[in-house]
Amino acid sequence: MLKLLSGSGFVSRSLYFLDAIAHKFTVPDEAEMIIEEITVTAFQQHTRIVGCEQTHAAICVDPGDEAERIVDRLAQRGLQLQAIALTHAHMDHVGGVAALKQLCPEAEIILHRADEPLYLGLPEQPAWLGIPRTQWRALGFDYAAPPKVDRYWQDGETYTVGALSFQVLHCPGHTPGHVVLFEPRERKAFVGDCLFAGSIGRTDLPGGSYEQLLDSLMHKLMPLGDDVVVYSGHGPATTIGQERRTNPFLTGAYTPGRYL
Ligand SMILES: [Zn+2]
Ligand SMILES: [Zn+2]
């Protein structure tokens, strides 16, 4: 029977599937990543708690608001917050930093140095979006000066959270100091506002550059591999492969020929 079917797609696919299962159960001490998502602000920004299943160490990626909800979620999962890990310093990503740092003073605030001017300018950021000053309070955009940065991301460094190891990739373009956090064993990337399902980050705000963003996407993100799951600051999760195949900014459909 096996002989008759050998070479058929059914058998080769089935064997591949069994092999994949065997691999999963024989890989020693595979890290397990906990991801808790809380969507905050009028911009529907996804604040994420990313934790190590083995050690219960965790980081909070981009606390845009609702620090108490973040702390409740940490407690529910029994996680210890070691860092407030910022992909970039736009207000929908850093608006909750001050309150979270107050509740978890031991957590270090980490940002790329090139985004520090944006970070320190947080109280004025709503003006960049053209939101009238009289509406800031009602919208929850009356930000105080943020607490000082404790540590700066370095491009290419590895940042350890329990058994998780994140590669830090400097991906400027949406902002000058935007970083992506990539966990190679888990095959997951936290990309902030660099890349979205079907779109890319805006580049018309202070410090933005379309050319730089395309360079970051083509030379830093796309090489991570088609299987990598992409967690964006807004909208649904996607994969590198899905975006490589269909995202008009990456296929060349938006700027024909240039990046093909
Ligand atoms: Zn942004
Ligand atoms: Zn955003």
Image (cartoon, rainbow, N blue to C red):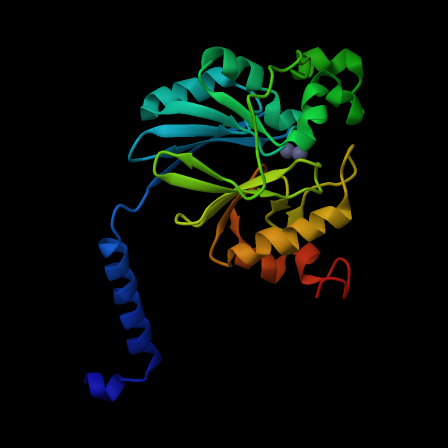
* Residue 85 position within the rendered picture, expressed as x and y whole percent measured from the top left: 52, 29
Q: Is residue 191 visible?
A: no
Count how many numbered circles sit on residues in the image: 0
- Quadrant where the C terminus sits is bottom right
Look at the picture and state if 250 lies above or below 35.
Answer: below
* Residue 15 position within the rendered picture, expressed as x and y whole percent measured from the top left: 27, 72
Look at the picture and state if 215 lies above or below 60.
Answer: below
In the current view of this chain or complex, which residue is farthest to the left? 1
- Quadrant where the N terminus sits is bottom left
In the current view of this chain or complex, which residue is farthest to the bottom? 4
Identify which residue, 173 or 15, lies in the foreground: 173
Identify which residue, 8 or 74, lies in the foreground: 74
Residue at (78% x, 11% y) in the render: 134
Asked if residue 78 lies left or right of residue 167, the reply is left
Residue at (31% x, 69% y) in the render: 16
Residue at (60% x, 59% y) in the render: 244
* Residue 178 position within the rendered picture, expressed as x and y whole percent measured from the top left: 64, 37
Identify which residue, 242 or 171, lies in the foreground: 171
Look at the picture and state if 103 lies above or below 8.
Answer: above
